[in-house]
Image: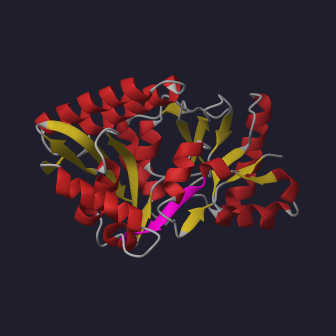
Amino acid sequence: MMDFKKLELEDKELFDKYIYPYKFLSCEYSFTTLYIWRDACDIRYTIYKNALIIKKKDFNGDYYFMQPLGYDKDDLKDIVEKLSNYKMEFHMEYLFKDLEENFIVEIKSLFGNIDGCIKEDRDNFDYLYEAKKLIMLSGKKLHKKKNHYNSFVKNYNYEVVSINSKNVADDVIESARTWYDENKSGQEDMLYYELQGIEDIVDNIEKLSLVGIAVYIDGKIAAFTIGERLNSKLAVIHIEKADRNVNGAYSFINKEFVDRCFNDAEIINREQDLGIVGLRKSKMSYYPIKLEKKFILNC
């Protein structure tokens, strides 16, 4: 029987060993993403045939496995069959979710025509942007964003600081709690777990190799954001919050963070929209260069 262990901060070194040989464009296979949602998604793992197997549940409470990592190709068929048996024994709703296209191709080569078992998971597609365009906000399509940015710069006496001291970290956590109180209606559970995750990663920002900035106006945080470099070409924005009463705050911190911390990256991953209409509209308004697909495999 496979024995799954609850994900903890101390597991970062082990996970990094498995994750970083891959060049994922998806945010799902970041230790920080997993750590933020470890309680909400009951994230657990085990090692089987020298492969990292991650089990989690979605926001509907249905369990599944993520893409195995670090496996020997000769072992993949056995690994999939082992997980399929586990799924049946424990009455899991899905076999795999969060799958990349390359893994789907590999599975097809082992099991033949399984197209009927595969489905695109649109609500979890990641939004990928060209870093330079987020910095420059050039062109007709991003003209409104640039106007919002310029309006913020013109109208507010602001200060941008790194989240690298206890005082700033405490202010960020207080700001996150205020944002939660003001925006939780209808999404209490998800946003409560996100708030817990924010508190955890702010307290452990150096251990997680994260960077973040906060924007102060008149001594109070108006916006903050946290992200990380996943590989030589890709950075991911894990958290971005702003006071909606401050005009242009989101446009400002979006541009400023990439410019200050990831200006040598090629691609910025701003994660998924979870099927939330307003969030989808906001992410599309920055004109992504690609939606990184994720798949469900369930046979």
Q: Is residue 230 left or right of residue 283?
A: left
Q: How is the image coloured?
A: secondary structure
Residue under the image location 13 percent in, 35 percent down:
166
The answer to whether one can see residue 256 in this image is no
Tell me which residue sits at (30%, 73%) in the image: 264
Q: Is residue 127 magenta?
A: yes
Q: Is residue 92 above or below residue 227?
A: above
- Residue 279 image point, x, y percent: 52, 46
| Residue at figure coordinates x 55%, y 32% from the top left | 41
Query: Picture coordinates of residue 6 (x, y %)?
Result: 49, 30
Q: Is residue 174 left or right of residue 110?
A: left
| Quadrant (top left/top right/bottom left/bottom right) for the N terminus | top right
Question: Residue 132: horizontal and vertical position, in percent?
Answer: 36, 73
**Compared to 26, does 136 lie above or below?**
below
- Whether the magenta-drawn stretch holds residue 209 is answered as no
145 vs 96: above or below: below
Q: How many marks?
A: 0
What range of the chain is rendered magenta? 125-131
Secondary structure mostly seen in the magenta stretch: strand
Q: Left of 183 or right of it: where is 91?
A: right
